[in-house]
Structures are given as C-alpha cells and as structure tokens.
Image: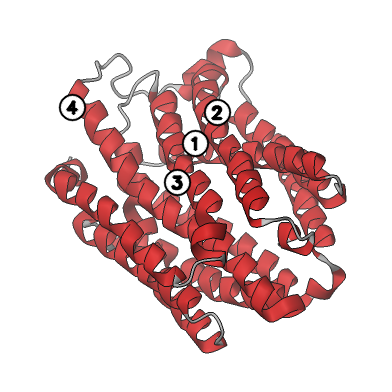
C-alpha cells in the first residue's frame, strides 16, 4: 500500500517486493542453525529486536532505498521467528500434544492479528506509517516480555542441550528422509505462494479500486480471516489427523477463495465470500502443515538446521508470490485464473508423497 500511495511503477514495485521478500530466505536458514548452537531464547529475542528496528524504520522512511532496507530488516526478524518458536513448543509438550501446541501458537498469532487488523479498520484515517510504527512497538514489547519469561540458558553447553532433542540425538539421516522432507516442503510452499500472491495483490488491488477506503476493505476481510482461524485453529488441530485430506483440499480452497476475492473485487460481498473460502482452506492446511514438516525433520543435533531450511524454502513461495502479484493480480486481466492454475503443480507433489504422509502420521 505504501508503494501504491507513492505511485511507484509496476516493474519497480515488483522488484522491490521481490528483494524485500528475498530476505525471508536468510531468516529461517540462519535462525534454524543458530538454534542448534545457541538455543531458542537468544534466537527468539534477536527476531523480535530485528522486527522492532525494521518496522520503526519503515514508518519514518521516505527515501525508497531506506524504506526497502528497513523492510528487509523487518522481514529478517519476522522470518527468523518461526523455527525456534515451533520447535521449542513441540519440545515442551508430550508427543501426543505436539500438533495441538502448534494450533495454540496459531491461535495466539491470530489473536494478535485480529487486534492489528481491527486497528487498521478503525484507524486507517491516521495513515499507514502510524500503524506500521505500532507494529514496531509491539515487537519491542515482545522482546522485553520474552527476555523476562523465556527460560535462560546459563552457558553454551546448556544452550546446546536445550537445542538438541533427547530422542535419537545421533541418528543417521537417510536420503529417503531428506527427499520426503524436501518434497513435503515444496507442497507447503504452494500455500505460501498462493497466500502471498493474494495478500500482496489484493492489498494493492483494493487500494486502487476503493481509493482511501482500500485499507479499510482489506482490514475487514482480514478480520474475517483471523477471527475464524482463531476460533477453529485449536479445534482443527485436535480433530483433523489426515494429511491426505487437509493438505490437498486446503490448497484447493485457498486458491479458489483467492480467485473469487480478486476476480470479483468490485463487490464487497465477493471479497468477503472469497475470504471465507480461503480461510476454510487455511484452517485445513494449518491443522497439519507445519506439524507434518516438524515430524519429518530428522531428530538430532541438526533438527533446527533441517527445519530452518524447510522454512527457508517455504519463504521462497512468498518471494515469488509478492514479486508476481503486480503483473498477475494487480494488472492481470483475469487475476482469479492465476490462483487456480498455480495450485496444479503442488497438487501433483501431494499425489507423489501421499502414501508417505500417511506413514509419517502413523509413526
């Protein structure tokens, strides 16, 4: 929306979004390896600090290169959060509670987003920079809270003990394990691509069509999304156990909902209806997606590195989604078809690994 407000051209906007989202590759890759070496607390605190610094810089940057640099720092912090947070949660609970623990993390994130998007709808008249700065302050608060309440590793040895799971710390990783992890990662990357294509494209599309009210329309649609995800995230994680239902059906519904909301973006009811369909798909995917990948990441001293690399690959979907949003969605003649065709190759990957998904969930 900032790029639209400053009348940055389509080509330059695509390049800037691609470069900014490119930083999401470095965040999880580095944080996963850092978890194996220094433990979870240090990495989580660093992620919050980078987010606070980058978002605050975005709020006050009027020079495009400085805006891009601030956004890169913010994305580094944002993308560095997931590996330590998810792995730490799954290690704090029993194996039978791991899937539900990720559901609770999604619920907490969605509660924060409900608050954020509600403020976006109510305070849109104050301007985007103020809202971005409020995001920076929330990251700073998270840093202070995390410093206070997260368990502290007293030394490097304790940090490494925290980072290394107790089960099978020296187990050998087979080529089959790696192949399955990377194929499953590519499947989940499909969700990242379609979701980011929608998020970036719809935000700009609504701004162009509705003018100053575009932020309010986008925020209302996202409130619908986050309220439903908050209500059903934990419920879905408790009762949905079949990845061969959740992942392909979730992918199809996510693409279909994004297609409806963008193809008929002139009508608010179509936007809300599309968002509802997309949200159902997101709930199905969220119930099992990251849990399956953590289960597939080989346990041992390098689990953080494997899962961090998986999250990095998923981030590539966000890069391509944001970079292609302007030509395919904002300037596309029929943006809805872009989402539908995008789902096809990822459904093919699911078909290849469907039997392995069943085996992993049974183990």
Measuring 68% from the left and 80% from the top, which residue is drawn there? 210
Q: According to the image, label 1 marks what residue?
A: 83
Q: Earlier in the sequence, mark 2 or mark 4?
A: 2
Q: According to the image, label 2 marks what residue?
A: 31
Vertical order, 319 against 340 (above or below) = above
Q: Find residue 169 and report its image quarter.
A: top left
Dot 2 alpha-carbon crowd within 10 angstroms: few under 14, some 14 to 19, many 20 or more: many
Measuring 40% from the left and 75% from the top, which residue is drawn there? 277
Alpha-carbon distance for marks 4 and 1?
Answer: 22 Å
Whether residue 48 is visible: no
Alpha-carbon distance for marks 4 and 3?
Answer: 24 Å
Q: According to the image, label 4 marks what residue?
A: 176
Q: According to the image, label 3 marks what residue?
A: 317
Which of the two discs, 4 and 1, sits closer to the camera? 4
Q: Earlier in the sequence, mark 4 or mark 1?
A: 1
Vertical order, 122 against 111 (above or below) = below
Q: Verify CB contact (< 8 Å) between mark 2 and mark 3.
A: no
Measuring 60% from the left and 70% from the top, which residue is drawn there? 205
Q: Verify CB contact (< 8 Å) between mark 1 and mark 2.
A: yes
């Amino acid at each position: 929306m900032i790029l639209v407000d400053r009348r940055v051209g389509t080509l330059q906007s695509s390049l800037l979004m691609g470069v900014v989202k490119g930083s999401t590759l470095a965040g999880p890759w580095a944080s996963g390896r850092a978890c194996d070496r220094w433990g979870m607390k240090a990495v989580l605190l660093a992620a919050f600090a980078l987010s606070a610094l980058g978002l605050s810089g975005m709020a006050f940057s009027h020079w495009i290169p400085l805006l891009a640099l601030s956004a890169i720092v913010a994305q580094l912090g944002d993308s560095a959060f997931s590996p330590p947070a998810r792995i730490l949660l799954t290690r704090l609970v029993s194996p039978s509670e791991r899937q539900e623990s990720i559901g609770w993390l999604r619920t907490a994130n969605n509660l924060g987003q409900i608050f954020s998007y509600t403020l976006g709808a109510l305070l849109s008249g104050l301007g985007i920079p103020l809202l971005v700065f409020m995001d920076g302050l929330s990251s700073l608060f998270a840093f202070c809270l995390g410093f206070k309440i997260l368990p502290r590793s007293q030394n490097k040895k304790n940090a490494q003990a925290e980072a290394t799971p107790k089960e099978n710390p020296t187990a050998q990783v087979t080529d089959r394990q790696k192949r399955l992890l990377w194929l499953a990662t590519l499947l989940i990357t499909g969700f990242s691509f379609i979701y980011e294509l929608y998020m970036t494209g719809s935000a700009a599309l609504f701004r162009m069509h509705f003018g100053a009210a575009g932020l309010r329309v986008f925020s209302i649609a996202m409130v619908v999304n986050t309220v439903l995800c908050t209500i059903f995230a934990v419920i879905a994680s408790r009762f949905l156990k079949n990845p061969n239902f959740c992942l392909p059906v979730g992918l199809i519904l996510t693409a279909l909902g994004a297609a409806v909301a963008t193809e008929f973006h002139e009508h608010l009811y179509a936007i809300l209806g599309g968002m509802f369909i997309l949200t159902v798909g997101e709930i199905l995917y969220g119930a099992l997606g990251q849990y399956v990948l953590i289960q597939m990441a080989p346990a041992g001293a390098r689990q953080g590195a494997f899962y961090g690399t998986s999250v990095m690959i998923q981030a590539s979907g966000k890069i391509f989604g944001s970079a292609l949003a302007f030509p395919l969605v904002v300037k596309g003649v029929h943006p809805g078809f872009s989402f539908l065709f995008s789902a096809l190759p990822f459904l093919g990957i699911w078909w290849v690994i469907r039997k392995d998904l069943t085996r992993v969930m049974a183990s």
